Image (cartoon, grey):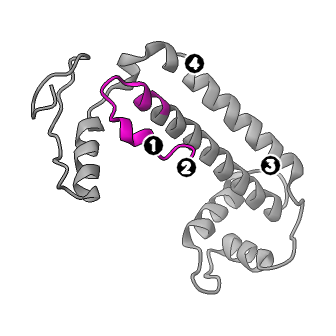
Amino acid sequence: SSGSGAANPKGMKKVGVASPANDATSKRVRLSKEWADVDLAAQYPEEFKNTPRACGALFVGVMAIYVLTMHPSVSGGDNGELLGCACELGVAHPPGYPTFTMLGWLFVKILPFGTPAFRVGVMSAACDALAAVFILLATQRWFLLSLRADAPAEEGAWIGS
């Protein structure tokens, strides 16, 4: 069942098997092809049943912690310059932080409450909460991929090393 195109016990096709002579790059390519079409939601429906609720709860929880503990106005460092650029769509010192500037400008214009500094702080909190959700989803996918019967044993070898 390790040959190219052979079906594994779960009915999924293996794209190809790298020979021991191949380097790490070809191994990564092989693994990405093998796992590219994996439908984890179909294989583990119970694991994904509460994922939207868990993501929402994590987002709200992280957002609440950040908003309740953030600085209410302009703090030191480059904060004043970056805040001014976000309010006027200006360019800060190099590298300029264009994504921060455009998202900050959007939050300053959309949110109807608070000072511009507070609004940009809420933008930073929202980005951090969204990052926490992506980490949750990536960890869930990594964990479920490691449970698969046809997962290569060497892929989990880095854990604990």
Q: Amino acid at mark 4?
A: Asn
Label 2: how many residues lie within 10 Å, few (<14), some (14-19) or many (20+)?
Answer: few
Q: Residue at x 75, y 80 (%)?
A: 81
Q: Residue at x 68, y 37 (%)?
A: 59
Name the residue carrying label 4: 50
Can you tell which mark lies on residue 161? 2
Q: Return the x and y of residue 62 as percentages of the image width and height.
A: 74, 41
Q: Earlier in the sequence, mark 4 or mark 2?
A: 4
Name the residue carrying label 3: 66
Q: Earlier in the sequence, mark 2 or mark 3?
A: 3
Q: Amino acid at mark 2?
A: Ser
**Circle 3: element type:** helix
Q: Is residue 84 above or below residue 44?
A: below
Name the residue carrying label 1: 157
Q: Is residue 32 above or below residue 9?
A: below
Say whether residue 152 is magenta. yes
What quarter of the picture does the N terminus occupy? top left
